[in-house]
């Protein structure tokens, strides 16, 4: 019985080759559309998650200023080194803490120049943000404490100013400051929102504060939570500590921000998952439409076959 069914199906396919090809094409396109669109959505989710993860492992960013509409920050009391030390000493679950103060500066070498983000910080910055020294070295304790004008270049700045040359030991001008290159960083590529993580130059915080900003403020405190710990708990502990240190009255809004990269990643992932579901639904509609078309073709085929059977010569003899 099964063999007869298969032989009959093959016979019908040969008899109506074009119709059979169109039927199979409808199935292939419908199923392929579902697979392709769902794969695109999942790929986008994975890419966004990886890009945000490049910013740093279990990263929390603390900055001054209350959050207002549009994502900007209102003016507020700047962060201090004492705030960073308090977070490091009093918050449980903190793996590493790094200060940060940044400014967009023109970096010049010979007849080449690049506008880049110059960050004053310490060696913990490399660990918190997940950077690795490619050539040369990071700051020594003496350089960090004395505020010596030494700098480490990101891959983008290095390629712009030096190309294939070795920059170690060379002098560059950062604004009006002469700075000796002691190391270069391994490229990290772009992060979320297309941010180029290699377009930076880092130097000791003391040198940055004295020679570029002219004050002792820091614009950012970078916190890396311990592996496996819920960063939301650490973020809430930091928020409570800073409210106490900055004497915020009960019921008042924060005049600082604690941004949790894991929370941002979850938000973006939820958005991309919703888009994936939407794309899958659109593809499913095309599959249903294709299925209805196939059912219509099969109905026509069965109707024609029945008509042929009723008007066959053998049928007329029986009559």
Image (cartoon, grey):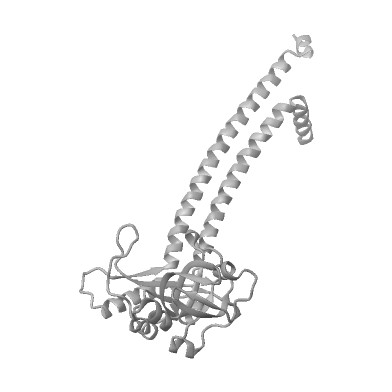
Q: Quadrant of residue 26?
A: top right
Q: Quadrant of the C terminus?
A: top right
Identify the residue at the far front of this view: 111
Image spot of residue 159 (x, y percent): 59, 68
Please report the residue visible at 43 percent of the width from the left and 80 percent of the height from the top.
97
Image spot of residue 61 (x, y percent): 40, 71
Q: In the image, 68: left or right of 129?
A: left
Label total for image: 0
Residue 11 drawn above or below residue 189: above
Q: In the image, 18: left or right of 93?
A: right
Q: Quadrant of residue 206?
A: bottom left
Image spot of residue 163 (x, y percent): 62, 68
Res 224 visible: no
Seen from the viewer's position, the closer of residues 144 and 28 is: 144
Please report the residue visible at 27 percent of the width from the left and 76 percent of the height from the top.
243
Q: Quadrant of the N terminus?
A: top right
Image spot of residue 274 (x, y percent): 46, 51
Please report the residue visible at 75 percent of the width from the left and 32 percent of the height from the top.
5
Seen from the viewer's position, the closer of residues 74 and 116 is: 116
Res 111 visible: yes
Identify the residue at the far bottom of this view: 142
């Amino acid at each position: 019985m099964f063999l007869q069914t298969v032989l009959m199906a093959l016979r019908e396919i040969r008899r109506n080759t074009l119709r059979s090809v169109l039927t199979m094409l409808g199935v292939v396109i419908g199923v392929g559309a579902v697979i392709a669109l769902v794969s695109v959505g999942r790929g986008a989710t994975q890419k966004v998650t990886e890009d945000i993860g490049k910013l740093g492992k279990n990263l929390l960013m603390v900055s001054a200023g209350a959050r207002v509409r549009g994502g900007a920050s209102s003016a507020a009391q700047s962060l201090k080194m004492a705030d960073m030390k308090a977070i490091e000493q009093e918050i449980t679950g903190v793996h590493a803490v790094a200060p940060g103060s940044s400014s967009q500066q023109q970096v010049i070498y010979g007849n080449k120049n690049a506008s880049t983000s110059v960050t004053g910080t310490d060696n913990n910055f490399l660990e918190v943000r997940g950077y690795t020294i490619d050539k040369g070295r990071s700051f020594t304790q003496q350089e960090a404490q004395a505020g010596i004008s030494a700098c480490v270049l990101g891959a983008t700045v290095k390629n712009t100013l030096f190309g294939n040359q070795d920059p170690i030991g060379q002098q560059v001008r950062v604004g009006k400051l002469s700075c000796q290159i002691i190391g270069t960083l391994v490229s990290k590529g772009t992060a979320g929102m297309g941010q180029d993580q290699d377009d930076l130059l880092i130097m000791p915080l003391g040198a940055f504060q004295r020679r570029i900003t002219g004050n002792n403020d820091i614009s950012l405190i970078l916190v890396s939570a311990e592996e496996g710990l819920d960063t939301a708990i650490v973020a809430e502990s930091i928020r409570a500590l800073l409210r106490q240190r900055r004497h915020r009255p009960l019921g008042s809004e924060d005049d600082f921000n604690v941004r949790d990269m894991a929370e941002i990643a979850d938000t973006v992932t939820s958005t991309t998952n919703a888009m994936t579901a939407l794309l899958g639904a659109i593809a499913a509609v095309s599959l249903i439409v294709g299925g209805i078309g196939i059912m219509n073709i099969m109905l026509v085929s069965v109707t024609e076959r029945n008509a042929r059977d009723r008007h066959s010569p053998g049928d007329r003899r029986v009559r």
